[in-house]
Amino acid sequence: MPHTDDARLLDRAARLLFAGMPTALLAGMARAPKATAKSWRQGRRRAPIRVVRQLLPLLQAHAAECNSLHRDIENWIFVREVEPRHRGGFCAIDPLTGLDKRNRRGRPSRTRL
């Protein structure tokens, strides 16, 4: 799981804000399926930045308990905004050109002899 630190922050925030049902209430706040919110909390998927931004005002309301958590999440948002865009799918990067070598025109047609 490459995003365990992100998941720990999101899990801590969800447990603090939504003590009774953290997964269900996080899903309701983010307008996402409950299974998706659970995978964000477990670190299987990365939560979108818009969801993390929605947590910030709620954490500010609980400022006494979660000052350090609020700062950690702000730093996390900053790092996510600065990092390069994630390439989805299979990407074989050509080291000479720096471009991916996927065949964007699709499978070549078969030539008949």
Image (tube, rainbow, N blue to C red):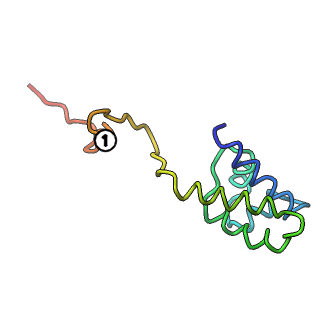
Badge 1 crowding class, 10 Å Cα cut-off, few under 14, some 14 to 19, many 20 or more, is few
| 31 horizontally vs 110: left or right | right
Which of the 4 image quadrants contains residue 22? bottom right
| Viewport quadrant of the C terminus | top left
108 or 11: nearer the viewer: 11
Q: Is residue 88 above or below residue 12?
A: above
Q: Amino acid at mark 1?
A: Leu
From what the image shows, is residue 5 above or below residue 51? above
Question: Count of labels shown?
Answer: 1
Q: Is residue 75 left or right of residue 66?
A: left
Q: Pinpoint residue 43: horizontal percent, then vertical percent.
A: 70, 44
Q: Nearer the viewer, residue 107 or 1?
A: 1
- Percent position (x, y) of residue 65? 89, 64
The residue drawn where x is 19% and y is 31% is 110
Circle 1 sits in a helix, a strand or a loop, which is it?
loop
Q: Residue at x 89, y 69 (%)?
A: 64
Q: Which residue is farthest top?
A: 113
Q: Residue at x 48, y 48 (%)?
A: 86
Q: Residue at x 45, y 46 (%)?
A: 87
Q: Position of residue 1 (x, y in %)?
A: 66, 37
Res 72 → quadrant:
bottom right
Q: Which residue is mark 1?
A: 99
Residue 40 against residue 56 in the figure, above or below: above
Q: Position of residue 6 (x, y in %)?
A: 69, 49
The answer to whether 85 appears left or right of 10 in the picture is: left
The correct choice, above or below, for 79 with respect to 96 in the image is: below
Name the residue nearer the viewer: 82 or 111.
82
Q: Nearer the viewer, residue 80 or 40?
A: 80
